[in-house]
Image: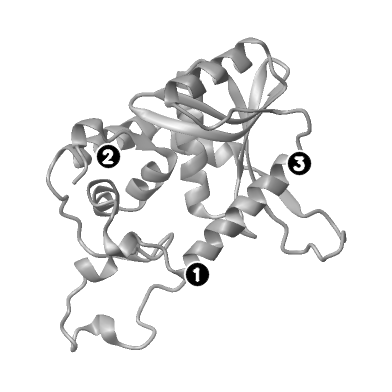
């Protein structure tokens, strides 16, 4: 079991907690749970995500990539890049309010920055907003004036070879700004949930939205006559 005293939040953990505190708790306290072992489909999806990230990075030639390594060295390298006005930073890391994030792309534009979060999906999704919001909160708390926020995702209208743009850059500044006012409360609630025993959460839409919960079977009744066993009995998307 993970030590709650050292269980800081990340953007992925925050998004899990935004969906459900129990999901977050299990991910942190039982990181080796069988439900979290990726199957072939999920492994392929991870590989696709890495490929999309590499393709997205090519859109920013000359950008400074913060290399993977110890957190302190990454934080120091990122601070150096920001202080010296680097035009584009890839995988810059920041920490504030007990949350550690790595920003896919930070573009310096005028007196501020544009945050670009890269996704391998072909459409904008609700959890993308939560992901971008927690990053924006940490960036601003770190003294980085983030003025515009975008989600860069695959363009479903693209046709190989080279018919159209592979990526769409969607401006999500407005919905992110709307969510930001609740971020401090959400962070505190998630940290409190991690510091205590397994939270009590009633089953509901969060078991399926915005993504199917891997721990679904731990919460839902095993009764073969339960209504949940009916065919196609799930929320409409």
Q: CA distance from mark 1 to mark 2?
A: 29 Å
Residue pointed to by mark 3? 58
Disc 1 is placed on an element classified as: helix
As displayed, is residue 111 above or below residue 117? above
Q: Position of residue 71 (x, y in %)?
A: 43, 26
Which residue of the protein is positioned furthest toward the top in this rendering? 83
Disc 3 is placed on an element classified as: loop
Q: Nearer the viewer, mark 1 or mark 2?
A: 1
Foreground pick, 87 / 135: 87
Tell me which numbered mark, 1 or 2, is placed earlier along the sequence. 1
**Residue 62 seen by the camera:** yes
The structure residue drawn at horizontal position 21% and vertical position 67%, both measured from the top left corner, is: 218
Q: Position of residue 32 (x, y in %)?
A: 28, 55
The structure residue drawn at horizontal position 43% and vertical position 20%, both measured from the top left corner, is: 72
Q: Is residue 107 left or right of residue 206?
A: right
Q: Position of residue 148 (x, y in %)?
A: 63, 31
As displayed, is residue 10 above or below residue 147? below
Query: Badge 2: few (under 14), some or many (20 or more) residues near its Cα, within 10 Å?
Result: many
Query: Badge 3: few (under 14), some or many (20 or more) residues near its Cα, within 10 Å?
Result: few
Q: CA distance from mark 3 to mark 2?
A: 36 Å
Disc 2 is placed on an element classified as: helix
Q: Residue 41: which disc?
A: 1
Tell me which numbered mark, 3 or 2, is placed earlier along the sequence. 3
Q: Quadrant of residue 34?
A: bottom left
Residue pointed to by mark 2? 190
């Amino acid at each position: 079991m993970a030590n709650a005293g050292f269980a800081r939040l990340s953007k992925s953990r925050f998004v899990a907690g935004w969906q459900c505190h129990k999901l977050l708790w299990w991910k942190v306290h039982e990181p080796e749970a069988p439900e979290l072992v990726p199957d072939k489909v999920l492994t392929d999806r991870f590989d696709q995500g890495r490929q999309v990230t590499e393709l997205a990075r090519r859109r920013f030639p000359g950008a400074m990539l913060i290399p993977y390594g110890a957190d302190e060295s990454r934080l120091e390298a990122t601070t150096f890049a920001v202080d010296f006005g680097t035009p584009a930073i890839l995988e810059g890391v920041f920490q504030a309010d007990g949350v550690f994030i790595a920003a896919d792309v930070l573009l310096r534009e005028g007196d501020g920055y544009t945050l670009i979060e890269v996704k391998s999906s072909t459409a904008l999704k609700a959890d993308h907003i939560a992901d971008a919001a927690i990053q924006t909160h940490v960036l601003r708390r770190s003294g980085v004036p983030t003025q515009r926020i975008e989600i860069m995702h695959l363009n479903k209208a693209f046709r190989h070879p080279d018919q159209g743009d592979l990526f769409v850059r969607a401006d999500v500044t407005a919905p992110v700004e709307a969510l930001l006012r609740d971020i401090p409360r959400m962070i505190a609630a998630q940290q409190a949930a991690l510091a205590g025993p397994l939270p009590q959460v009633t089953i509901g839409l969060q078991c399926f939205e915005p993504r199917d919960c891997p721990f679904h079977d731990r919460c839902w009744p095993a009764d073969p006559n339960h209504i949940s066993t009916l065919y196609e009995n799930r929320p409409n998307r």
